[in-house]
Image: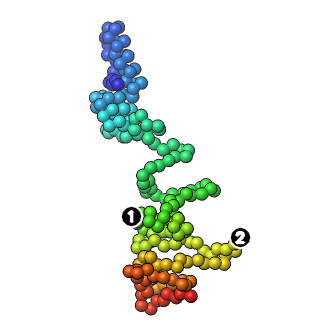
Amino acid sequence: MAQHDYVLDNQSGLAFRQDLNNALAAIVSINSGASAPSTTYAYQLWGDTTTGLLKQRNSANSAWVTIGTLGSTNWGLAPQASPTFSGTATFGGDVALSGTGYLDLPAGTTAQRPGSASSGMIRFNTTLSQFEGYNGTAWSAVGGGATGGGADTVFLENGQTVTTNYTITTSKNAVSAGPVTINAGVTVTVPSGQAWVIV
């Protein structure tokens, strides 16, 4: 760890060499130290050993900008090729995918649904073998048109047991293929002027 003001004063030969060596040591160690260099320059790098972060001076030489984590591969930044993220990634704009392969959505059982779901969430339910989305009130199937053998699209399938309270969407009717069982303590609400038909 070494830091230097990068000013080589007029001095004796030995002192000059020591001063120069100190400056070179600061360069190769990216000015690392527990506190910031006392003399700073625009775009100067600093290895902050107190926080373990690599920082760079901004263009106005008025503040330090954090680049990444010291000692971590890629400074902890995602590589361009095949990056892996942990935790929740948040995007402020649109996300455009240009590949022709696939988008691997999260998959889990009904019991593994997020505890605090928010509108717009989408996942694959392995219990129900279907894609589902959260509309702000409940989880419901996404897409999943008619299916069949080969290229046939003949059959629309639904479950046979209602396990969660449900209210038919306002101004909509609903149809299900019976028999359908509503579990004890579960309520299906059909608003006035609407219908739920079981065939």
Which of the numbered marks, if any, corresponds to residue 150?
2
In the depicted view, which residue is nearer to us: 16 or 72? 72
Q: Can I make out residue 167 in this image?
A: no
Q: Circle 1 sits on which residue? A: 115
Packing grade of label 1 (10 A; few <14, some 14-19, many >=20) is: few
In x, y percent, where is residue 101? 62, 56
In x, y percent, where is residue 112? 44, 63
Q: Which residue lies furthest to the front in this view?
A: 184
Q: Can I make out residue 85 in this image?
A: yes
Which of the numbered marks, if any, corresponds to residue 197?
none
The residue shown at (53%, 44%) is 80
The residue shown at (50%, 59%) is 106
The residue shown at (46%, 67%) is 110
| Residue 182 found in image quarter | bottom left
Mark earlier in primary sequence (1, 2): 1
Q: Which amino acid, mark 1?
A: Gly
Left or right of residue 7, residue 103 in this image? right
Q: Is mark 2 on a helix, strand or loop?
A: loop
Q: Which amino acid, mark 2?
A: Gly
